[in-house]
Amino acid sequence: MLKNKTLDKSSSISLRQPDLKGEIKNGLLRSIPIMFGYFPIGFAFGVLAVNAGLGILESVLMSLLVYAGSSQLIAVSLLAGQAGLLAVTLTTFLVNLRHSLMSAALAPHLGNFNIRQLAFFSYELTDETFAVHSLDFKKEENPPPPRVFTINILAHFAWVGYTLLGAWTGSVLTNLEAWGLDYALPAMFIALLILQLENTKRIYVALFSLIFSTLFSLGLGGHWYVIISTVLAASLGLALEKANR
């Protein structure tokens, strides 16, 4: 009887191991588009960060510890424009508020994750990994953690690696206009904006945001117009949402 239990235990372990390897391989395949997509933005961030006054180590640590692509690009752009610490902090905070919405959308599918796994998952969540996870989670209620974390970790490693490459290149490359890298930030946000224009309400919010930011940029000094325009446009979106209920 003891021998049978030992055989059952060893057989169950052997059954789990192929599943683990399969999920890791599955996560690797799903992360490939993200890793390719990160290259131009991560590389551009490294170049821009060094040219904004950060060192190579500081740029890499920012990608390793902060890991928020759009906010990192905004931060170095504001630093390059001599913006104050408060303006940088508030702007990046408002930009990153979208992560709370993405987390709320994925949370119902993570019932099989413990508290440490949830904390690590939330730290590794980005716009791109959210897009991949949201498609996967529609197909299964409790996604396997090995596959989920393989996607997140490989994407993070790719972002840090591209930052290092860009920062090293940026230490010898100063003519950004010739390479077009100075347009990486607005190009990325234009693409993200277009993907969000799914209905008339969102188009109105985008137009009002454009109007607010243009008007305030003409009348206000510094970068406060970005924060004020964001708050006003978001308030308008909330009012339109309530009016349609």
Image (cartoon, rainbow, N blue to C red):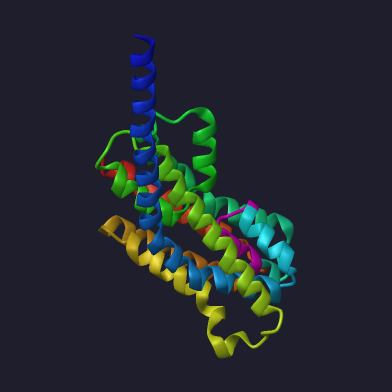
Please name whichever residue, 36 or 194, is drawn nearer the observer in this view of the structure: 36
Question: In the shown orientation, is residue 58 left or right of residue 238?
Answer: right
Q: State whether residue 70 appears in this view.
A: no
70 within the magenta span: yes
56 is higher (above) or lower (below) than 237: below
Q: Horizontal and vertical percent for residue 238?
A: 39, 46
Looking at this view, is 17 or 179 the one in front?
17
Q: Relative to the observer, which residue lies in front, 157 or 209?
A: 157
171 relative position to 125: left or right:
right
* Apparent side of residue 20 relative to residue 99 in the rendered image (left or right): left
Residue at the spot 29% in from the left edge and 49% down from the top edge:
135
Magenta stretch: includes residue 62: no
Magenta residue span? 65-77
Q: Quadrant of the N terminus?
A: top left
Q: Is residue 127 above or below residue 173?
A: above
- Residue at x-position 36% and y-position 33%: 14
- Residue 57, position in %: x, y? 73, 64
Q: Residue at x 40, y 62 (%)?
A: 32
Vertical comparison of 159 with 180: above or below: above
- Total labels drawn: 0
Q: Quadrant of residue 198?
A: bottom left
Residue 230, percent from left and from top:
50, 57
Give the farthest residue toward the top: 1
